[in-house]
Each structure stands twice: as C-alpha cells, then as structure tokens.
Amino acid sequence: MKEISKVNADHHRAAANNRGRMILIADDDASIRTVLSQALTRAGFQVRSTTNAATLWKWVKDGEGDLVLTDVMMPDGSVFEFLPRIRRERPKLPIIVMSAQNTLLTAISAVEQGAYEYLPKPFDLGKMIDLVSQHRSESQNRKVLKDKNLPLIGRSMQMQEVYRTISRVSPTDLPIVIQGEVGVGKKLVAQTIHDFSKRKSANFAHFNIAGLEAHELSQTLLGDGKSQIGLLQECDNGTIFIESVDEATSSAQSRLFSLVSSSKTDNIRFIFSATRELGALVRESAFRTDLYHLINIIGLVIPPLRERIDDIGDLARLFIEKASESANSQKLLDKSAIAELANYSWPGNVRELENLMKRMAVLFPDTNIDGQAIAASLAEQQVQIVTNEDTGNSDLSGVAKVALAQLFVQYKGQGVTPHDLYEIVLKAVEKPLFELTLKETKGNQIRAASLLGLNRNTLRKRLTELNLQ
C-alpha cells in the first residue's frame, strides 16, 4: 500500500508541476492526437492539437505553447520546412519530432533543423510523457542538412537508438568509442558521424592500431620527419578513426594517451572502435584506466544483425540492387528469400549479408531469387568456411566436417528436409568403416568385431543391413 501511495503521490506531484504548461500537438493521424492529448491532459498539461503545419505555425507565431510535439509529414507539407521559421521566431521553444519514417536521415534532419528531440513511431507513451515533462528550453543553432544520402539503413528500434545518438554526437568534438562485433559497420558509423559534423569539409582518415608498437603508432600519426606526413597533419581540423583500440599493445596505449591528451591534437576529433567492452578490459588490467577515461566520453554500441531482424529485408534489397548494378544484372528477392535470410544467425553481420548479395548477383542465373536459392548459397558458404578451416588438416574430425557440410548443401539444394539424418550419416560412415575393417582382417568377422569393439552378433546384423555380407 505504501508503494501505491508513493506512486500516486509522484503522479500528483508531476501533474502539479506540469499544470499550466501548454503542449502543441501537430499530427494528421486522429488516433495519435487523441492518445497524446488524453495522456498529456492526465499528466497535468494543457493541450491544443491540429492536423496541419500551418495552424501550428500560427499558434507558435502568436506566442502560444511551451513545447511542440509534431509529426514530420502533414497534408500541407513537411514540418522540416517550418522548423527554421519556428527557430527564428521562438528560438527557446522546445520541439519534439515524431516520425514513422524511421531513418538516420530523419533523426539527423530533426536535430539539424533545431528539434529538441526525435522519437520514432511507434513510441513508448510513458517515455514520451517523461520526455515532455523533463524538457528544458534551450536554443539550437545548427546548420540545415544538405546531404540526402542515407549511409545507414534500418528501421528497427535498436537502430533508432543508434540514429538518435549519432544525431546528438555529430555536432560535438567529443571522442567516441564505437563498440560492436566484426562486420556490424563500425567504420561506416564513424564516417557518418564525420560527414554530419562541422568537420565534414576536412579529411577523414582511419587505421587499425591492433599489434602496433609505440614507435609505429607515432610514425602513423606524426610521420617520419622526412617524406611521410602523419595523419595529424593530413587530418588537420578533421577526424581520425582508430580501429580495434581494444587490441592495442601496452606500449601503443601509453603512446596513444600521450598524443590524444596533448595540445597537438586539439584540432582533431578522435573516434575509436572496439569489438570488446573496454570497461571489462580495464577491470582485467588489459587496458589503461587513464586512456579509457580519456577516450570513452561517449560510447555507442552497434547491435549485431541477429538482434535487428526487422532490418534484414531492407538491407538485403539495398545490397542486391547495388550488386546487380555493378554486375550489370537484374536480381530480385522474393518473400521466401527474405524469410530465409531472417532465419540465419549472421555471424559476419552486415558485411556477411552484403557479400552474400554480391555473390548472388553474379552467380545466380535467374532474375528472381527465392528462399531455396538463399538456403543453398548459405550452405555452400558454410562448406567453404569449414573447408578453409580444415585445409591441410587431414584428421577425421576435419574431413567429417567438410563431408557433413556438403551433405547439408545437397539437401538444401533439393529443398528436402530429412527426418532420419542421424541414420543417413551413420550408414554413410559405417559402410566404409566396416569395408576397410574387413579388408584389414581379411574377412575375419571375429577379428573385425574385436577391432571395432563390437559384439560379433551386432556386427553381423549391421553387415546384413548394409548389404556387406
């Protein structure tokens, strides 16, 4: 009962704090307006709502409202066309932009145009109310976004969080650590942050620090003092992306700390990538504590592809379109292909998906790519991986892995799902084993049974079943 009373008290306190504050809602979806209006009213706010941007602009111009909550696309145009005017008219008026167009471009555009916050639809109503309740007035003075290219693709909630972080950190000069598995696109994220920053007209350079010693790192960043210039000079007022910082040697970590903390790098923005969590490495004494606190001001985690299944269709279609153009072919993915892609675990993440689409664009003979074709290609890929791993490895396990992988390719290609796979594999292994054993024992089944560690009657039964009598 005490907990319920506390919740009620908190609710009433919040409603009292919100009382008198006017929220302006602009959305052409009646259900969204109704839900927001009711929730905000219960939270103690006064609410006015409209279906169009023109009415919203009139209210703002007349001095109404303490916060604007608006959709992007409305019947009379995009709210992005009105945001600059609102910023000029009332620079301290907070604006929250909602959109079902959940792309990086929308998030970046919202912040660049002066929005206080961007939220993708569908949104969490409680989170929305908290955001409105906690808002503070703040002036925004950002350039209008010109670049209309979409470097990152994904409409999943996981990627929406990534977009929001990118939109907020891009205008700053703070160092960033981008963490994620191999193939998730850490370099692309770093490039995107640079491209949407005030440093975008300067150079963006990258290098992998894994395995470098201190003198090699110094030469990379400072040059050799002769003919080779360093990246610090090459990227003056730009961005340097240092990959695999979690793999840096102890000497390189020491040198990196000295360089990044020195005045020589004041006009450089540093972005780092790691596949492992740096905090854990610090606790294991595998990463310098002072370097960790110097570079890990902002952490950005890129989710693996298996955790953003909703994005696989969009990514695959984009990759197959690009690959088809490069291969001078026309390839289309049907629904069964997308479903097959969504069922795969993607250990190589986005990079693996892109490479698969490149391969399909070149090697698949038909225009329409279905699920069976995807399954066969993925199975062949696994055979290649296993074969490469076991090249030169003639032990029984390595040979068996290759053979079994090829067996799965065969069934995938035929579109067959066997229900007695164990028995099929057992027979395939037993027959040559018994043949060779009998050859070795010159047909003596007693010696063969002893060599195999089997009962003689069991061996005779299996030989009969395998037609080896």
Image (spheres, rainbow, N blue to C red):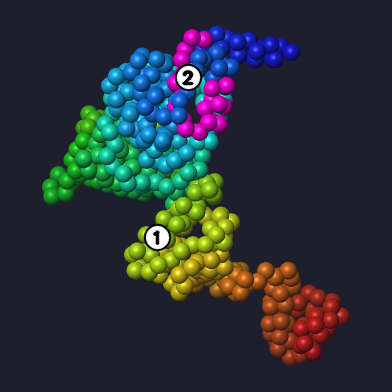
Give the percent coordinates (x, y) of residue 211. Answer: 36, 49
Which residue sits at x=28%, y=33%?
A: 144
Q: Position of residue 247 (x, y in %)?
A: 41, 45
- Answer left or right for 293 relative to 444: left
- Residue 335, given in percent of the width and then of the height, sits at 55, 59
Give neighbour class at mark 2: few <14, some 14-19, many 20+ (Cα, 10 Å).
some
Q: Which residues are magenta?
A: 19-38
* Residue under label 1: 321
User: Residue 22 magenta-drawn?
Assistant: yes
Q: Is residue 348 in view?
A: yes
Q: Is residue 456 visible in the rendered structure shown here?
A: no
Give amino acid for label 1.
Glu
Most extreme residue toward the left is: 226
Q: Residue at x 54, y 19 (%)?
A: 40
Q: In the picture shown, does residue 438 fall above or below 372?
A: below
Whole-number angstrom distance, CA of label 1 to CA of label 2: 45 Å
